[in-house]
Image: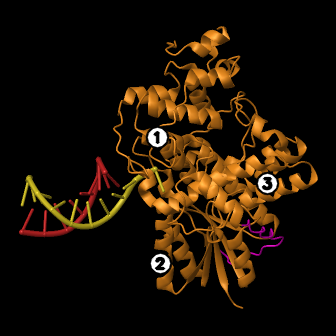
Chain colours: A orange, B yellow, C red
Amino acid sequence: MAQRSLVWFRNDLRLHDHEALTAALAESSDILLLYCFDERQFGKLPSGFPKTGKFRAKFLIESVEHLRQAVRERGGELLVRMGKPEQIIADLAGALGITSVYFHQEATSEEQYVESALRQNLNALGVRTREFWGSTLYHKSDLPMSIEALPDVFTNFRKQVEKHAQVRPLFPTPTRLKHFADVEAGEVPTLQGLGLEEPQPDVRAVMTFKGGESQGLQRLHEYIWQKDLLKTYKDTRNGLIGADYSSKLSPWLANGCLSPRKVYEEVKKYEAQRIANDSTYWLIFELLWRDYFRFIALKYGNRIFHKFGIKGKPREWSHDREAFERWVVGKTGQPFIDANMRELAATGFMSNRGRQNVASYLVHDLNVDWRWGAEYFESVLIDYDVCSNYGNWNYVAGIGNDPREDRYFNPKRQAALYDPKAEFIKRWIPELSSWDAKRLIEADSLEYT
DNA sequence: ACATGATTTTC
DNA sequence: AAAATCATG
């Protein structure tokens, strides 16, 4: 078996439960591992925001560095490059006599374009690709329906999947990796090198998110086992302050530092050893939403990016740049909205409750084009995931798959419910810290200095 | 050079 | 579906 393989890491920056890596190890005599920073991911969005902002870029850099470290600890090497993966991989394959390239497929067109360009380039060299699906809890091939027949209502999808599909077992984490070629390892780029500034730490942040597989596994272990918080997840998940109210696994899931099947496995273990209740189920339920948006992206392709969304529902949007800017910096005058937006700008993170509210506010109160909001989230959210982001924005904009049209969140009512003492508002808008909570919650047109 | 229609792109 | 880009007479 004189097979020389290359494993191309993408949004799967881990060694556990990695089918492409597992297959490559089983089918090859020699293996090369590569991560390529795609230069196209570091340009500007139409709105002028960097496509990959500082929080995301930092998390990605850390994730790649930790993957390299984990590979080296096992006797291997992770090559790191910057450029176009379809060219860089083809060049490496040609120069080093690689016979197969292994990778996980993505669900959206930019990524699929790179896959097909790579496939073509490799085909011309007589190199084959071995492609896998590895980003969802339920495997694409295990769905009880075709992608074309994917239900447009989440609950229908969930019920069918829960009834008829099974989560596949994990692939084992390799203990030894070898490195065969005398080839430059390559440097992991710095934030500065990517033209981005270093994010300043903020003591008010819910927690410190550090990229990397071991950091993701550590957070999973801490949340479920050490702090024993899974059993109350459903009751606390609408919180706003601190590390404990929710799992906070999304940044690691988005970059593939954590496999959703690994999360599932730990939840099942917890249910067997400690307790199974609505809360333990609810974490799986949320993973299903993540799956759903990924399959929706497969079903509808680029329609998730369209102005009128996957429904093709005509709706006119405002292009009031000033109103949008006020939303971005957290100066709309609506304290609950502004506090959330300031948290996002300062930390790259916002609670799920906050996200639903600020998105509803932009779309339904300001009537601003939902795509502007989606772009801003894309740039700054540390857990940005193209399918979840655009799927959710379609949903709030009323052009996605929400059976209830135009789901509106009343920010005053939401503040009264979820921030009754205005602790969260005061935390992020310090100029209001001496205000009476009731007055803050009822305010809707504050002027900040 | 340019209007018009076709094609491509939309993160 | 709409906007942007491309092709062509």
Residue drawn at (48%, 46%) of the image: A394
Tell me which label, 1 or 3, sits earlier in the chain: 3
Q: Chain of mark 1?
A: A
Q: Is residue A123 left or right of residue A180?
A: left
| Cα distance in 3D space between marks 3 and 2 | 34 Å
Q: Main secondary structure of the magenta part?
A: loop
Task: Please state the extent of the stretch shown in magenta in the rendering.
Answer: A166-183
Indicate the amino acid at tag 1.
Ala
Indicate the amino acid at tag 3.
Ser
The residue that label 1 is drawn on is A397
Mark 2 and mark 1 residues within 8 Å of each other at the beta carbon: no
Residue drawn at (67%, 48%) of the image: A251
Tell me which label, 2 or 1, sits earlier in the chain: 2
Residues at marks 3 and 2, common chain? yes
| Cα distance in 3D space between marks 2 and 1 | 40 Å
Disc on res. A121: 2
Task: Determine whether the residue tagged by mark 3 lies in a helix, strand or loop.
Answer: helix
Crowding at dot 2, Cα within 10 Å, few <14 / some 14-19 / many 20+, comes out as some
Residue A98 in view of the camera: no
Question: Where residue C1 sits in the image (x, y, percent)?
Answer: 31, 51
Residues at marks 1 and 3, common chain? yes
